Image: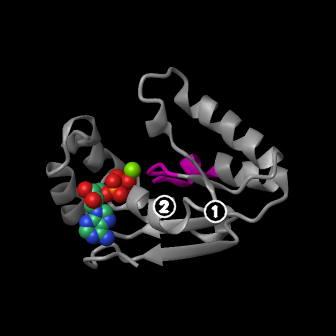
Amino acid sequence: MVGLQGSGKSTWVARHLARTHTVVSKDHWPNARRRESRQRRVVAELLAAGARVVVDNTNPAPADRAPLIAAARDAGVPVRAVWMDTPAELCLARNEVREGRARVPLQGVFATRARFLPPTTAEGFDRIDVVRGGAPDGA
Ligand SMILES: Nc1ncnc2c1ncn2[C@@H]1O[C@H](COP(=O)(O)OP(=O)(O)O)[C@@H](O)[C@H]1O
Ligand SMILES: [Mg+2]
């Protein structure tokens, strides 16, 4: 998954992939140290065991996505990006109405937006899907 905080990634995953894929997210371990290396290990283990995996994080830059693409290559499976292309204003508005921990600091959304580069096949993705998240019911 690729998209800002509040862009609708987790909602889309629950609707479209949760039945067929194991969902991995650093959000599952909010207090763990070394969440990035832990996530890489978990993804590699799941792929080695033959699972289909979806990584539900913002993954805004090629550098964030490269290790995931490499993990898929190592496992010999295709890798797809699903880009939740939701306007930042809408992400911020959705974030505002969230409760407690689910709400991220505004600064976090802006920092992610500043690093953001759309996913491309040049990075190694076999397929890229763009979800225009501004629609009321996603897609
Ligand atoms: N297609 C949509 N239309 C309207 N609201 C949505 C849609 N997708 C998600 N939301 C709402 O927006 C907020 C953020 O969605 P979420 O899936 O948690 O985003 P992310 O995982 O990218 O941070 C939630 O309150 C969710 O209910
Ligand atoms: Mg989420």
Q: Amino acid at mark 1?
A: Thr
In the rendered image, residue 130, in percent from the top left (x then y), is placed at: 47, 76
Name which residue lies at 50% across and 53% down.
61
Q: Quadrant of the C terminus?
A: bottom left
Q: Quadrant of residue 124 in the image?
A: bottom right
Chain part drawn in magenta: 56-66
Q: Amino acid at mark 2?
A: Val
**Distance (Cα) linking label 1 and label 2:** 10 Å
Q: Is mark 2 within 8 Å of ligand 1?
A: yes
Apparent side of residue 45 relative to residue 18 in the rendered image (left or right): right
Q: Secondary structure at mark 2?
A: helix
Q: Which mark is residue 13?
A: 2
Considering depth in this image, is 64 or 97 the residue closer to the camera?
Answer: 97
Considering depth in this image, is 123 or 5 the residue closer to the camera?
Answer: 5
Apparent side of residue 22 relative to residue 14 in the rendered image (left or right): right
Q: What residue is disc 1 on?
A: 20
Name which residue lies at 74% across and 48% down.
71
In the rendered image, residue 17, in percent from the top left (x then y), is placed at: 56, 64
Apparent side of residue 79 relative to residue 62 in the rendered image (left or right): right
